Image (tube, helix red, strand yellow):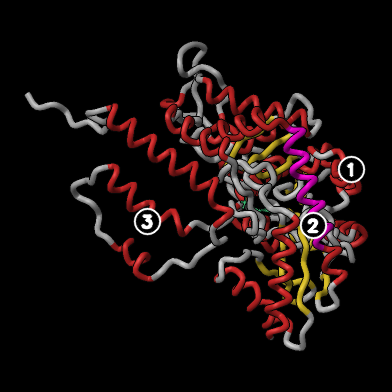
């Protein structure tokens, strides 16, 4: 009689030796990364290797691992490197790496049912509730990132405004709901409006003041004008750290306004919500504890490996009203695996979900929030130091105030946009540093976002030195 095919090793000891070699490689990679280039372009012949056809017969694990070492590992995106300061990206940790391995070993499906992985996630939600001083009606869920969390917040606010029946009925033609946010809010909120069916035309973009914070007077009058036109303001989205410059909207005042207007108050805290972990920064996000919902990202300032974001909702009934459903094949019980309702799937769009919570749990458990808060505060101190250096260099110009850990500047030049864009690209291509760019008041800026815990003052000195050399070359 033929044996049924298996995907497990026939020789577990041989597998163990190979697995240990792979683990050693992973540890070496993280340890040695700072000595290598931040990033390197992938040579065409390496890229061409990915055109290999679908494997019909498999290859030995060691051979596939060798291909990984040669063609994949060296061409990383650089975000773990000390001089990666582009976009808004965390660097990961060796602890998070190990947690990913253990999570994969357990391989639970975290959509629901009664098992420990779900309890780990619930514990994280309780910890976050404590951190943001939310009440015990709070629910939350881990998701890929703040883009998805912001979308879920829009859907939850919409369902509260229109009633649960809107889930069955859909939106009426020419619905009258309006949401408000500043022009500096992340683009994913616009996409959230699109994907919620409300449409991004229903998102009113409010101008910002000189500090890049939302103009409260303009926000108040936009809401009043829309009410006078018979529209229904239902949601205000504030940023705890705008993506361009790290500005923090006046959260307390917005909370007052939202309460008066009976609007849902959502905070996009992807960048800066974890300011609450650092005593010297906590005051900057005062008022976040009054939000109806908060989106945040563990994979940025908390250095959890990608991906890990979260939505936290003050009133779990509104949260469940937006997402919970029923199906015979997902019936909940009192005992056995089907116990433990409500399940994570009741609070978001996913059914099958990985054990994202474990790497967050390991990170919080091993480092503790005091140390993580120190890391966060130190990225802000580095940003202030960088801004001081820029102020001392007559050839450089700071383009926005530094609120948190983001510094926007440029090399002064008659053709500044072109020169500064070239400087950034060349720094990346040469493997020296990886800042990114944005536009501040129309001007192209070199944008340095210090999220990564590995960045040091010397890395930023080197970055500025290289900008000066390249700028002078023209
Ligand atoms: C990064 C970021 C987002 C998007 O979060 P993802 O985790 O990339 O989906 C949204 N808002 C702000 C302010 C961000 O910095």
Of 137 and 297, nearer the camera is 297
Of 28 and 353, nearer the camera is 28
Q: Residue at x 54, y 36 (%)?
A: 356
**Mark 2 and mark 3 residues within 8 Å of each other at the beta carbon:** no
Q: Is the N terminus in the top left, top right, bottom left or bottom right quadrant? A: top left
Residue 94, quarter of picture: top right
Residue 65 visible in image? yes
Q: Residue at x 72, y 50 (%)?
A: 271
Marks 1 and 3, Cα distance to the nearest angstrom? 48 Å
- The local crowd at label 1, few if under 14, some if 14 to 19, many if 20 or more residues have their Cα within 10 Å, is few
Q: Residue at x 77, y 66 (%)?
A: 408
The first of marks 1 and 2 along the sequence is 1
Asked if the stretch drawn in magenta spans residue 376, the answer is yes
Viewer-nearest of labels 2 and 3? 3
Of 409 and 115, nearer the camera is 409
- The local crowd at label 2, few if under 14, some if 14 to 19, many if 20 or more residues have their Cα within 10 Å, is many
Q: Is residue 415 left or right of residue 196?
A: right
Q: Secondary structure at mark 3?
A: helix
Number of numbered discs overlaid on the protein picture: 3
Looking at the image, is 183 positioned above or below residue 21? below
Task: Identify the residue position indicated by label 1 in the image.
Answer: 283
Viewer-nearest of labels 1 and 2? 2
Task: Identify the residue position indicated by label 2 in the image.
Answer: 383
Q: Is residue 14 left or right of residue 42?
A: left
Dominant secondary structure of the residues highlighted in magenta in the image: helix
Residue 154 visible in image? no
Q: Position of residue 159 (x, y in %)?
A: 67, 42
Task: Identify the residue position indicated by label 3 in the image.
Answer: 70
Q: Secondary structure at mark 1?
A: helix
Marks 1 and 2, Cα distance to the nearest angstrom? 18 Å
Residue bounds of the magenta highlight? 369-386
Asked if the stretch drawn in magenta spans residue 249, the answer is no
């Amino acid at each position: 009689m033929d044996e049924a095919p298996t995907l497990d090793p026939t020789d577990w000891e041989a597998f163990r030796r190979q697995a240990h070699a792979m683990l050693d490689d992973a540890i070496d990679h993280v340890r040695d990364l700072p000595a290598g280039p931040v990033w390197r372009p992938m040579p065409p012949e390496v890229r061409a290797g990915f055109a290999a056809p679908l494997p019909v017969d498999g290859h030995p694990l060691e051979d596939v691992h060798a291909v990984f070492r040669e063609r994949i590992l060296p061409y990383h995106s650089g975000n773990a490197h000390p001089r990666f300061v582009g976009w808004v990206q965390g660097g990961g940790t060796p602890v998070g790496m190990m947690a990913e391995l253990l999570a994969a070993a357990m391989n639970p499906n975290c959509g629901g049912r009664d098992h420990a992985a779900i309890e780990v996630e619930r514990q994280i939600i309780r910890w976050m509730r404590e951190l943001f001083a939310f009440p015990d009606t709070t629910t939350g869920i881990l998701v890929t990132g703040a883009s998805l969390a912001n979308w879920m917040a829009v859907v939850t606010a919409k369902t509260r405004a229109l009633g649960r029946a809107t889930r069955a009925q859909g939106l009426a033609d020419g619905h009258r709901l309006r949401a408000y946010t500043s022009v500096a809010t992340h683009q994913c909120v616009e996409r959230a409006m699109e994907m919620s069916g409300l449409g991004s035309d229903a998102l009113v973009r409010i101008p910002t003041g000189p500090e890049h914070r939302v103009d409260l007077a303009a926000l108040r009058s936009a809401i009043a004008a829309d009410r006078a036109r018979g529209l229904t303001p239902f949601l205000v989205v504030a940023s705890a750290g705008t993506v361009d410059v790290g500005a923090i909207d006046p959260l307390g005042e917005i909370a007052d306004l939202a309460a008066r207007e009976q609007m849902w108050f959502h905070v996009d805290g992807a960048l800066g919500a974890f300011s609450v972990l650092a005593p010297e920064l906590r005051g900057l996000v005062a008022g976040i504890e009054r939000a109806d919902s908060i989106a945040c990202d563990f994979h940025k300032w908390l250095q959890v490996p990608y991906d890990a974001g979260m939505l936290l909702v003050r009133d779990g009934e509104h949260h469940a009203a937006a997402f919970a459903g029923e199906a015979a094949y997902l019936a909940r019980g009192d005992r056995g695996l089907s116990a433990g309702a409500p399940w994570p799937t009741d609070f978001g769009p996913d059914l099958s979900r990985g054990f994202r919570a474990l790497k967050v749990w390991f990170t919080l458990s091993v480092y503790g929030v005091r140390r993580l808060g120190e890391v966060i505060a130190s990225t802000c101190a580095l940003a202030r130091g960088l801004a001081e250096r820029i102020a001392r260099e007559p050839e450089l110009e700071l383009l926005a105030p530094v609120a948190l850990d983001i510094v926007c500047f440029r090399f002064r030049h008659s053709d500044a946009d072109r020169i500064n864009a070239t400087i950034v690209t060349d720094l990346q291509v040469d493997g020296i540093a990886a800042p990114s760019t944005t536009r501040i008041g129309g001007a192209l800026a070199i944008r340095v976002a210090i999220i990564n815990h590995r960045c040091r003052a010397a890395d930023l000195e080197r970055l500025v030195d290289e900008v000066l050399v390249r700028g002078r070359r023209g």
